[in-house]
Amino acid sequence: MLDVARGKDPQAERMAKRSQGTFAELADRYVNEYAKKKNRSWKQADYLIRKHVLGPFGKLQAANITRDDMKALMGRIEARVVANQTIAATSAIFSWAMREGVGGIQINPCAKVELNDTASRERVLSDSELPLFWAAFNRAGMAGAVLKTILLTGQRRGEVVHMRTEHIDGNFWTMPGSPDRKLGWPGTKNGDTHMVWLPKPVQELLIELNSDGFVFAGPRGGPVWQVNSVMRDICAELRINNKVTPHDLRRTHGTCIAKLGFGRDAMNRIQNHRDGGIASVYDRHEYAAENQMIMERVAAHILSIAEGKDDSANVVPLRAG
């Protein structure tokens, strides 16, 4: 009452205060107050926000971000699917803020932003393409080593890029499901800890690199980042019209697992697909020997095609049934 008598408007001041706050602060509140409790896949969304949105918009007042800003963001992200996922993650933050009356958000700037058309990809490398790409990987330095490892292990690009020597025990690579910011490890995509055998060609590659910390380190010691652009350059060099992505190398590995008769369950288990994989720690160790055999067999088969060698000595007889 005293403030009103002095000509002030306390209610308006409180509303103005609520409308203050940067997008970075809003995103942090969303994660801690809502996403961690309600959204099982919040880690992936938070990763996209931190990678693509906080840079250009983190210091802006959240309420001042416009639809044109979101359209511009879409144009800066080259991967069409990733752009769509980033807009969806950003939209979730603004929708939550509107529901909760946080940050003075009146409109969702992501609403009605036209998303990219994304056709389902089934691209795998053919036997005739494998030698061409393998030779190109040999010329591509550290990024080429990453691409080789994706092809020979079938693991996700983001996880291979962030491979740490601390996570390798013997020739098993154990990827913690949760992020470790101190080590720069982002966690696995589905949040499940995943153990994978590193086949002999990858073991030899790691010995050659002789890394400490990030296995595939850039000049400043952080993870090498230019993997996607190197792959685009390779496709241009080879004049490949049906472009190949790092994820297509993972798909090529999974297809090879099925091609050699090991089955979809083995593919899901090795590539850490939650919908068909083995989740418990007991089962991961129970299948360790079988996974090791499959990984060695698949890597030998891929390498035999890539380098024009005969891998018949490595043939593993399939069990009936």
Image (tube, rainbow, N blue to C red):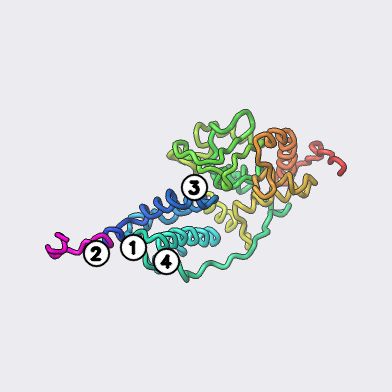
Relative placement, left or right, of 265 versus 118 is right
The amino acid type, in three-letter code, at marker 1 is Gly
Mark number, residue 136: none
Residue 6 forms part of the magenta stretch: yes
> Which residue is nearer to you in this view: 100 or 1?
1
Looking at the rendered structure, which numbered label has been put on residue 12? 2
Q: Quadrant of residue 169?
A: top right
Callout 1: few (<14), some (14-19), or many (20+) C-alpha neighbours within 10 Å?
A: many
Most foreground residue, 218 or 12: 12
Element type at marker 3?
Answer: loop
Question: Marks 3 and 1, how far apart in space?
Answer: 37 Å
Residue at image location 48% in from the left, 38% down from the top: 180
Magenta span of residues: 1-15
Taken as a whole, is the magenta stretch helix, strand or loop?
Answer: helix
Q: Which residue is mark 3?
A: 225
As helix, strand or loop, the secondary structure at mark 4 comes to: loop
Residue type at mark 4 is Asn
Q: Residue at x 61, y 52 (%)?
A: 247
* Among the two numbered marks 4 and 3 on one chain, the one whose residue lies closer to the N terminus: 4
Q: What residue is pinned by disc 4?
A: 108
Check disc 1 and report its element: helix, strand or loop.
Answer: loop
Q: Quadrant of the C terminus?
A: top right
